[in-house]
Image: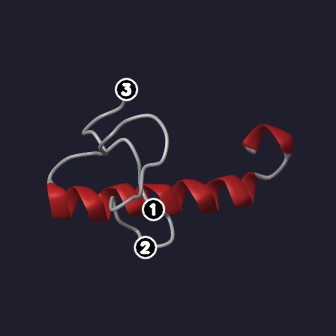
Amino acid sequence: MDQFSFKQDAKRLANKYMHLISINYQREKNIREKYNALTLSSAVHIKVGYKANVTGFG
């Protein structure tokens, strides 16, 4: 987005993402593969792929 002149939107989304990661890290002391952006949590319903919301990035 930043490369296509959407600098304010890119910064806003980056800040929201960092906030999401930060509050979940403070709560769970780890970083998960998937997050629910609506609830700001790592509680997700996984339909495809991993059977669980794994720690880290895979």
Query: In the rendered image of this protein, does residue 3 appear above or below residue 17?
Result: above
Q: Quadrant of the N terminus?
A: top right
- Expressed as whole percent of the image width and height from the top left, the position of residue 42 reads 33, 58
| Residue at 27% in and 39% down | 54
Say which residue label 3 marks: 58
Regarding mark 2 in the picture, which secondary structure is present there? loop
Outermost residue, right side: 4
The mark tally for this picture is 3
Residue 12 % position (x, y): 62, 62
Neighbours of disc 1 within 10 Å: few (<14), some (14-19), many (20+): few
Q: Residues within 10 Å of mark 2 (few under 14, many from 20)?
A: few
Q: CA distance from mark 3 to mark 2?
A: 23 Å
Viewer-nearest residue: 43 or 47: 47
**Mark earlier in primary sequence (3, 1):** 1
Which SS class for mark 1?
A: loop
Q: Position of residue 21 (x, y in %)?
A: 36, 55
Instruction: Residue at 48% x, 48% y: name it.
Output: 47
Between discs 3 and 2, the one toward the N terminus: 2
In the rendered image, which quarter is residue 56 located in? top left
- Contact between marks 3 and 2 (CB within 8 A): the answer is no
In front: 37, or 52? 52
Mark 1 to mark 2 CA distance (whole Å): 6 Å
| Label 3–label 1 contact, CB within 8 A | no
Q: Position of residue 14 (x, y in %)?
A: 55, 53
Whether residue 20 sits left or right of residue 56 in the image: it is right
Mark 1 in CB contact with mark 2 (< 8 angstroms) = yes
Residue, disc 2: 39
Q: Which mark is residue 36?
A: 1
The kind of secondary structure element at disc 3 is: loop
Say what amino acid the circle numbered 3 marks: Gly
Amino acid type at circle 2 is Thr
The amino acid sitting under disc 1 is Asn
